[in-house]
Amino acid sequence: MAVKSLQLFESYLPNAQNWAFRILNNLPDTDLNIAAFRYYNELFVTAKMKLLPLPDYVGLHLLEGRDSAKNFIDKIFKRISNRHKNELFFKYIAEWSRQNKIDLMHVHFANMGWQYLKLKQLTGLPYLVSFYGFDYESLPFQFPLWKKRYTELYDVADGFICEGPHGAELLHRQGCKADKIHVVHLGVETEKIPAVSRTKNQGELKLLQLANYSQKKGHIYALKAFIKALQNCPNMSLTFVGNELENVKSKLEEEIKRHHAEDKVHFIPFVEFSKLYQFFGEYHVFIHPSCYADNRDCEGGAPIVLLDAQCTGMPVISTTHCDIPEEVIHNKTGLLTPEKDVDALAASIATFYQMDNSTYQQFAGAARQHVLTAYDIKPCSEQLQKVYNHYT
């Protein structure tokens, strides 16, 4: 009999979180019911998914940190009102879960794990929480109150899911019991990703980074390393694709102007997902030097786009940050360096620039085979299914 799950989100579902849709949609033996404070993206709703109807009073304004009150008195009244509406919403979810015979709740992101924690008390159902990125270290680092909340979460929730061993170790160091932690890779739908034929001659290189502009994505280090490598590798280009999140792009533009590299570095705001793999085919190497941000934000696991790129046959230049060394095998599917090391990154760029097509094809073939073997979505979803079965 299929596990009847309730998947809990803040919003369902931002484009940048498509990896959550992929692994859920490929679960072999689970009914998917979804609840969130907002639904807004039909792209990630399939026939096998049922969205919980939202009461009129539910919205993002109920979440902590979304208070728009202008003065102290208004703020107090709004918090009381929001607390009451949250209680109503959680009772509504709990009753719906009872009526629909839900077996298990799975909350996505640790901050939402704490936000929905009342449901554990109301339903008594197995309660799982997935960590993904900023919730590993940045949240408790920036707001010490969350250290206490994480302690409560680790005590009350039944299980926690991480992308890889790095994230699992972080949770264990923070006080989570080891037997509550499960590692489940976030895979890609390899059967939908075509192998893209590329030829790379010695003395040329087209680099691509696709990531929204935030400090942890390491754009500034990609750019500085590219500019440094340009001194001896003139026949190169670097293209950035993404949306601004943290005022990173303007700093990149300043750096480009300072070094007169406007004809070498290009910006593209958006690429349609349906055209993504064809777009990848225009470039030789994917560069993504992830790093810890000043606020301790990190990848937690590793960016799924590294798998997308490699599965098309595109080697990767990246860093030894978090679980990236699992996704990118150094000297086989790409090149890895310590994070924020511009000289080492520049050396990696130069290595691919000077590489002949025969050696390049070895990297390209190994990159695709690695993803096919270790990160196909079906085995990853089967692993998540095993976790669900363990708790039901």
Image (cartoon, rainbow, N blue to C red):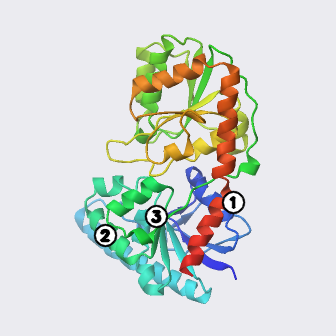
Name the kind of residue labelled 3 in the image. Leu
Point out residue 250 in the picture as x, y percentages from the top left corner.
Answer: 42, 29
Mark 3 / mark 2, whichever is N-terminal: 3
Q: Is residue 216 left or right of residue 48?
A: left
In this figure, which residue is indicated by the disc labeled 3?
Answer: 60
Point out residue 196 in the picture as x, y percentages from the top left corner.
Answer: 75, 34
Point out residue 370 in the picture as x, y percentages from the top left corner.
Answer: 65, 44
Labels 2, 1: front one = 1
Name the kind of residue labelled 1 in the image. Lys
Tell me what residue is drawn at x 56 percent, y 15 percent: 263
90 vs 149, nearest the viewer: 149
In this figure, which residue is indicated by the disc labeled 1?
Answer: 378
Category of crowding for the residue at label 3, using alpha-carbon neighbours closer than 10 angstroms: few (below 14), some (14–19), many (at least 20): some
35 vs 381, nearest the viewer: 381
In this figure, which residue is indicated by the disc labeled 2?
Answer: 151
Q: Quadrant of the C terminus?
A: bottom right
Point out residue 235 in the picture as x, y percentages from the top left corner.
Answer: 59, 13
Q: Helix, strand or loop at disc 1?
A: helix
